[in-house]
Amino acid sequence: MNLEDLYRLLRSEHVQAQGIVDTLEEPLLVLDQTGCVLSANRGFYETFRVGRDDTVGRSLFALGDGQWDIPELRQLVSEIVPKSAAIVGYEVAAEFPTIGRRTMLVSARRLVHPDNNSTSILILFEDVTDRRHGEIQREILLAETRHRMKNLLGIVRSLANQTVVEGRSAKEYRDAFLGRFQAVAEAETLALAGSAEADLSALVEQLLKAAGPERCRLIAGPAVHLKSRQVMPMSLILHELVTNAWKYGAFSKPGGLVHLSWRISEEEGKSLLHIDWREENGPPVTPPTRSGFGSRLIDLSAVQGLRGAVELKYEPTGLRVHITAPVES
């Protein structure tokens, strides 16, 4: 039943009108031209958790010890009475007594009784708080998706532009690029997998599964849940370390091993994640003569992505890496 149906029903003063109105779930008030409540339906009492004695015969703006004295409602009533107009879907967001802050769509119409030419005001409330919250959440999700896609395209472009071409065959370039792209894609999958967090252990196992337990000694630390924005930089760091191990480090020789562990420390009242990567039994290691894209990507991901730090040590026995990052609650 819409506002016009209610208007015709109440205007007719049918003997069953009040009984029909009481069956409506939507809160309904009838005011006199001064704003005093003449009647209310059951939906109004149940929605706003008030009784009849606290409502009927009182000014709308005096309800709830004056908490209903809302400027938007005053404007609504003042527009209805002098102009004999109907207003539909007037949005009012306010702190209502007993039910807290809610967003209501308020529709109102002047009601003229033909027998005595008296005037009253019919007001219908629709609680759209949850709907508005859902709309806001969808807008946030859409904005986040756009931002994520923009970042993702930027990363892919950077990977394509900075993956070394010189001295490589087309297949080598393709494999290097697609390997990094796959890491980004898998990180995105984890970040969007129905949760705002991802488990560090699951991420590590996924990125190291190709090496197998015989090549990787994993010493799992305490459970660490990465926030969605931390998943991609962490994935990129680990992927670069794994890729380097296969090409130049421990995984490139039979018997080569990678030791990976993590722990959490408390420093100045904050939790700090420590990840240690250590290679052994691989080819002799010497510090690089220049910083390649891989090492720059690791540093950028640690500093800007994780808001932490990374230390790479090119020791003769193998590469050692120490990563620190704050544990976000």
Image (tube, rainbow, N blue to C red):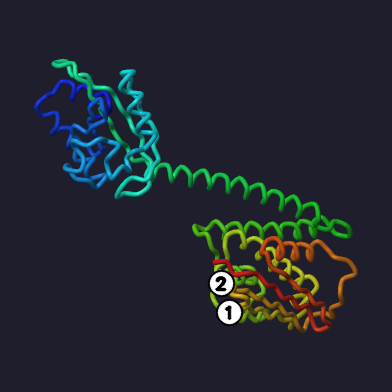
Q: Quadrant of residue 104?
A: top left
Q: Is residue 292 above or below residue 50?
A: below
Measured as percent of width and height from the top left, residue 114 is found at 17, 15
Q: Residue at x 76, y 56 (%)?
A: 174
Disc 1 secondary structure class = loop
Of residue 272 and residue 189, the one placed in the foreground of this image is: 272
Quadrant occupied by the N terminus? top left
In the picture, measured across the screen, residue 123 lies left or right of residue 241, that is: left
Quadrant occupied by the C terminus? bottom right
Q: Is residue 38 above or below residue 112?
A: below
Q: Quadrant of residue 202?
A: bottom right
Q: Is residue 279 above or below residue 8?
A: below
Q: Quadrant of residue 77?
A: top left
Measured as percent of width and height from the top left, residue 44 is found at 24, 40
User: Residue lying furthest right in this view?
Assistant: 289
Query: Label 2: which residue?
Result: 224
Amino acid bearing label 2 = Val
Of residue 53 and residue 106, the one placed in the foreground of this image is: 53
In the picture, measured across the screen, residue 136 lies left or right of residue 15, that is: right
* Label of residue 221 in the image: 1
Q: Residues within 10 Å of mark 1 (few under 14, many from 20)?
A: some
Disc 2 secondary structure class = loop
Measured as percent of width and height from the top left, residue 321 is found at 74, 75
Of residue 1 and residue 237, the one placed in the foreground of this image is: 1
Amino acid bearing label 1 = Gly
* Label of residue 96 in the image: none
Measured as percent of width and height from the top left, residue 120 is found at 23, 24
Q: Residue at x 73, y 66 (%)?
A: 240
| Cβ atoms under marks 2 and 1 closer than 8 Å | yes
